[in-house]
Image: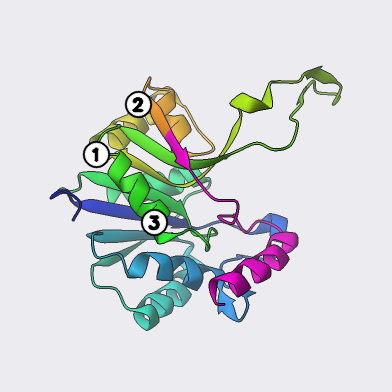
Amino acid sequence: MIQDKFVSVIISAAGSGTRMGTEGKLHLEIAGEAVLSRTLRKFSGLSWVDELILVVRPAEEAFAQALVTQIGFSYPVHFVYGGAQRHHSVKNGLAALSAASDIVLTHDGARPFVRPEEIRRVAEAVLIHPAAAVAVPMTDTVKIVREDLSVLTTPDRSSLYRVQTPQGFQTRVLLHAYEKAEKEGIAGTDDCSIVEKQGVRVQLLPGSETNIKITTRADLRFGEGIAGEEEA
């Protein structure tokens, strides 16, 4: 535990893989190991985690269960099914949390190169802040455009960050935010945006450029290089 807090982890692994051109993407391999396996291994050795909720597609449940058995966890792993969109999947994961949960971390199953120290840093930040996430500063210039793709404005990139996962929350804060979001018909592309819309302040922490999300075939090739560095 972290300061006697019950820590839960929700890993969302129910993506369809349409941008990858495949039916489900987490079974795809990087340097001979499935993407989901690499992600799960980063969490399996964390002695301060108390439970893990793995959100999967029904068609991939058996595959995910086999990975969990093969890797081995010292704490309970529960399986739930995903929804139509990511926030539906996280909502299903939240419904499976232990009543004892104090801190909940959410993570993308397709981010296999997260570092254990980043995971712990987010959890420890939630001892102080209601919500926290790792992020990296934007290096590209970003354009805000109209529907016809003509440029409307160019924001100052010094204030722009690319938010990653894990994202961490005081459990009661995230539960309340999702409850309110459902009543108000609010959706978000990540969990931080859900709590932000309820007026919750989110603290960003330094992330890493290698904590990529496997979304395209190009990401798989990039991941091969990262895997080589990890295993060197």
Of the two numbered discs 2 and 1 on the same chain, state the one appearing first in sequence. Answer: 1
- Check the image and name the residue furthest to the front: 232
- Left/right placement of residue 143 relative to residue 225 reads right
Do labels 2 and 3 touch, CB within 8 Å?
no
Distance from Cα at disc 2 to Cα at disc 1: 23 Å
Foreground mark, 3 or 1, reads 3
Q: Secondary structure at mark 3?
A: helix
Task: Name the quadrant of the C terminus.
Answer: bottom right
Which is closer to the viewer, label 2 or label 3?
3
Residue at 43% in and 40% down:
133
Q: Which residues are magenta?
A: 204-232
Q: CA distance from mark 2 to mark 3?
A: 32 Å
| Amino acid tagged 2 | Lys
Q: Residue at x 39, y 56 (%)?
A: 117
Does the stretch in magenta take in 220?
yes
* Tag 2 residue: 180
Residue ID for mark 1: 127
